[in-house]
Image (cartoon, helix red, strand yellow):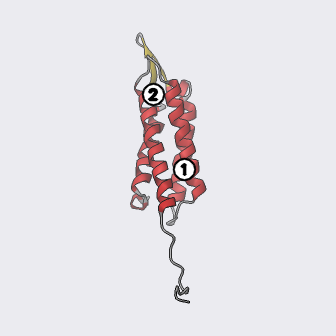
Amino acid sequence: MHLERLTLPQRISAVAIVVVALAAFLPWVSIFGLSAIGLEGDGMLTLAFAIAGGVVLAITSGLVGGERTPGRASQIALVVLASLVAVIGLFDMNGAAAMGLYLTLFGGIAWVVGAVWQLRLKQDAPAAPVEGLDEAA
């Protein structure tokens, strides 16, 4: 693995993806000593989104294999997956929320921030000059 190939926003996204994946195995709701882990409910969805996001991030960023530049479609896919995780965490939040649900919500928000930041970096990048063209001509 080539972690040095990741930009700062991609590193934020990667850490957030790991947090979301781990949070699915933690208690999401706890009341009167009884708890339910995320995999017994919507945690299955957030885990699937985290796995899909991790695969997309690893393949398109060059984390594994050769060096690559992520395309716009993969960046938008990461923003959509991150947003879905954050929305699930927000809608599932309640008075009996436990650590796993909080980590899912905060991990989803951090993932959205990293994914949107990376998407903005791609849009704000200046166009590379084309060789062989003379501006005076």
Residue 65 circle label: none
Coordinates of residue 6 in the picture (x, y in percent): 43, 58
The residue at the far front in this view is 136
The residue at the far bottom in this view is 137
Q: Amino acid at mark 1?
A: Val
Of badges 1 and 2, nearer the viewer stands 2
Residue displayed at 44% across by 21% down:
97
The residue at the far right in this view is 73
Coordinates of residue 112 in the picture (x, y in percent): 48, 43
* Residue pointed to by mark 1: 55
Q: Secondary structure at mark 2?
A: helix
How far apart are labels 1 and 2 at the CA level? 23 Å
Whether 41 is drawn above or below 109: the answer is above
* Residue pointed to by mark 2: 101
Coordinates of residue 136 in the picture (x, y in percent): 52, 88
Whether 94 is drawn above or below 16: the answer is above
Residue 64 visible, this orientation: no
Residue displayed at 47% across by 54% down:
118
Q: Label 1 neighbourhood size at 10 Å, few (<14), some (14-19), many (20+)?
A: some
| Viewer-proximal residue among 50 and 130 | 130
Whether 29 is drawn above or below 68: the answer is above
The residue at the far top in this view is 32
Left or right of 72 on screen, residue 27: left
Residue displayed at 40% across by 26% down:
99
